[in-house]
Image: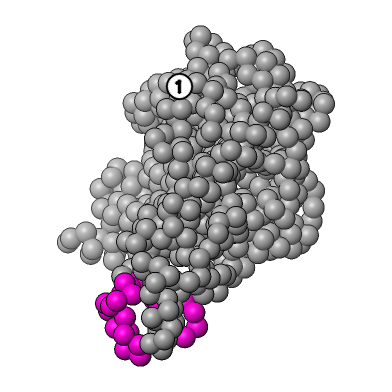
């Protein structure tokens, strides 16, 4: 555990970057520091590996003051990933990743073997090993940055806006990759970002800092969205925090209706029987994949015109996707019904906006009960 | 007779290829002076440039020294040194070194300063000692520019080393000064051609060194 204890950073010109900040950063979890520019989040991160020395207060790593060991020993025990990756342009990808093992005295060969292993771990083609950084895309460079930070298998990983310089598609890939790697390795990660969505997606706990380096709120992301501590946090979270909070509610409990599902080759009898079951029918192909919506009266047995069908929005996977995805599917669908599919994309049922609304109210109710229980204890 | 005829006459005269005043001997002397001056200038300019570039301190003082060094006329300095020290190799070396230190020093300083700060920050953050940050990150990245400073200095030394002949030393300047005195223009043109040729050879040597020493990851980008 990293314990930041009443730390202040004041520069000689009197600017206070961090103001009596106290934080407990749990092991094997991703703790995100988020806030507007000038809130001291990067300064806080850089105090953990002593790239910046605090003016007052102390930082403890597993109960020991970080100033008790030589600064370079401390830094080698913490992976460090920065914006734009900061790769060494004169070294090949493999030698970039091998840097810290080499600093720790491993042989060139051992270090390179380890580097090759890490390239695979972060999803880099080992054919890139002999390339130089300028030959890689921004996203690939950032993966190399992560691999380099992990090379000596440090327990702690410090990440300073690592994904903010890449385009949104690559950023999402890198975020997913980080979550996957974290699942496998279980590092203690401190992650700095100015992007609240990134903080909510990645953070086990999120510390929101306000300008002047003071802590505004430190909570798990779902709690941040449901109960912002003050108007600053609320503003920072943005307009649709209610919708975003739905990401934390599972869609598994939704009651799916199967009656409106009809295969495209259904006979007249089936169509007539289903016509009374629902105002709209979802036509599926031979494999059960959704094709589109239709009104019962417009369907004739054996002659379904696929071009006549209405778009069915984006389907969701119950259990895997959240209520947010289910609601999104319902809103996108012109009939107001969301389509549920299994892992293979086969339709397994449909659910109405009303049913999703009830599920949301129920989920809110469960959270409220848990909060009351916790308060009563 | 035009310049080419003078040059042809000079190089085809077999007398110019033997003995203490022959081309090989003068060439060797000239190269000797140049190497010595470049070595001394590099021994001063490189460490100071690397250190100030790495720490970022002393840039203003450097700029002042460099301007002052460049403003000193080499020939005037040579005469002054002879008056002070007397004849010998030293009074010829001093103007050459004074000439060569500013381009080496200032370019090295600028080269290290202009290294992208993020790899340097990453190197420190992963626990690289300062000396390694300088020699394993900053210097390899700055190398094309550092070499260009050395190259400028070397070419200037090659052409200016001819002044050594004014104070009775050897080198290719001998042909130019003796030729002018004797009104032997074959000699003047021959000497000047040799100096120009040596300057081109110097450029070629630096090109080869940078091909060999600069990482392919840095070479691209257009510098060096």
- Locate residue B205, reporting x and y percent: 47, 57
- Residue A28 lies in magenta, yes or no? no
Which element type, helix, strand or loop, lies under badge 1?
Answer: helix
Which residue is pictured at 43% across the width and 79% down the height? Answer: A273
Provide the residue span drawn in magenta: A283-309
Residue identifier under label 1? A231
Q: Quadrant of the N terminus of chain B?
A: bottom left
Looking at the picture, tell me which residue is in the foreground, B143 or B38. B143
- Locate residue B224, reporting x and y percent: 42, 52
Asked if residue A169 is positioned above or below residue A52 in the image, the reply reads below
On screen, residue A32 versus residue B157, left or right, reads: right
Which residue is pictured at 70% across the width and 41% down the height? Answer: A29
**Neighbour class for label 1 at 10 Å: few (<14), some, many (≥20)?**
few
Which residue is pictured at 55% across the width and 59% down the height? Answer: A255
- Locate residue A52, reporting x and y percent: 62, 24
In the current view of this chain or complex, which residue is farthest to the left?
Answer: B1
- Residue A296 lies in magenta, yes or no? yes
Residue A359 seen from this side: yes
How many numbered tags mark residues here?
1
């Amino acid at each position: 555990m990293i314990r930041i204890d009443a730390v202040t950073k004041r520069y000689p010109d009197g600017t206070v970057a961090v103001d009596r900040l106290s934080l407990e950063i749990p092991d094997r979890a991703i703790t995100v520091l988020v806030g507007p520019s000038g809130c001291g989040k990067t300064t806080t991160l850089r105090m953990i590996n002593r790239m910046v020395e605090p003016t007052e207060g102390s930082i403890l790593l597993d109960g020991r003051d970080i100033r008790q060991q030589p600064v370079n020993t401390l830094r080698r025990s913490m992976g460090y990933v920065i914006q734009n990756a900061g790769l060494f342009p004169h070294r090949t990808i493999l030698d970039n990743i091998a840097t810290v093992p080499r600093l720790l005295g491993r042989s060139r060969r051992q270090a390179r073997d380890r580097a090759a292993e890490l390239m695979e771990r972060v999803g880099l083609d080992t054919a890139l090993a002999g390339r130089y950084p300028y030959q890689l895309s921004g996203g690939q460079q950032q993966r190399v940055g992560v691999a380099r930070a992990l090379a000596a298998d440090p327990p702690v990983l410090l990440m300073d806006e690592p994904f903010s310089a890449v385009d949104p598609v690559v950023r999402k890939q890198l975020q997913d990759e980080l979550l996957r790697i974290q699942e496998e390795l279980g590092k203690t990660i401190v992650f700095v970002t100015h992007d609240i969505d990134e903080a909510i997606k990645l953070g086990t706990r999120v510390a929101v800092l306000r300008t002047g380096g003071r802590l505004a709120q430190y909570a798990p992301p779902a709690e941040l969205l449901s109960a912002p501590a003050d108007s600053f946090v609320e503003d920072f979270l943005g307009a649709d925090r209610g919708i975003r909070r739905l990401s934390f509610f599972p869609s598994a409990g939704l009651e799916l209706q199967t009656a409106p599902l009809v295969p495209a080759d259904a006979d007249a009898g089936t169509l007539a029987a289903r016509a009374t079951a629902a105002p709209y029918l979802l036509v599926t192909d031979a494999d059960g994949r959704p094709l589109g919506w239709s009104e019962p009266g417009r369907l004739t047995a054996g002659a379904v015109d696929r071009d006549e069908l209405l778009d069915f929005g984006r389907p969701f996977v119950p259990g895997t996707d959240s209520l947010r995805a289910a609601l999104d599917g319902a809103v996108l669908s012109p009939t107001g019904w969301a389509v549920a599919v299994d892992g293979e994309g086969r339709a397994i049922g449909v659910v109405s906006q009303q049913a999703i609304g009830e599920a949301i109210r129920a989920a809110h109710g469960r959270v409220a009960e848990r909060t009351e229980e916790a308060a009563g204890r | 007779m035009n310049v080419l005829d003078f040059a042809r006459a000079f190089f085809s005269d077999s007398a110019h290829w033997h003995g203490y005043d022959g081309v090989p001997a003068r060439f060797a002397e000239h190269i000797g002076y140049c190497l010595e001056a470049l070595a001394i200038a590099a021994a001063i300019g490189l460490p100071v440039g690397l250190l100030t570039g790495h720490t970022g301190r002393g840039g203003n003082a450097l700029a002042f020294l460099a301007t002052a060094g460049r403003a000193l006329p080499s020939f005037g300095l040579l005469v002054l040194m002879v008056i002070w020290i007397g004849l010998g190799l030293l009074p010829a070396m001093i103007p050459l070194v004074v000439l060569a230190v500013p381009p080496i020093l200032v370019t090295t300083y600028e080269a290290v300063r202009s290294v992208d700060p993020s790899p340097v920050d990453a190197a420190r953050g992963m626990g690289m000692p300062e000396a390694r940050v300088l020699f394993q990150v900053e210097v390899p990245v700055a190398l094309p520019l550092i070499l260009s400073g050395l190259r400028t200095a070397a070419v200037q030394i090659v052409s200016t080393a001819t002044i050594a002949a004014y104070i009775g030393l050897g080198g290719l300047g001998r042909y130019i000064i003796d030729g002018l005195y004797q009104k032997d223009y074959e000699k003047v043109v021959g000497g000047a051609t040799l100096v120009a040729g040596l300057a081109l050879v110097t450029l070629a040597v630096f090109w080869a060194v940078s091909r060999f020493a600069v990482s392919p990851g840095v070479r691209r980008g257009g510098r060096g």
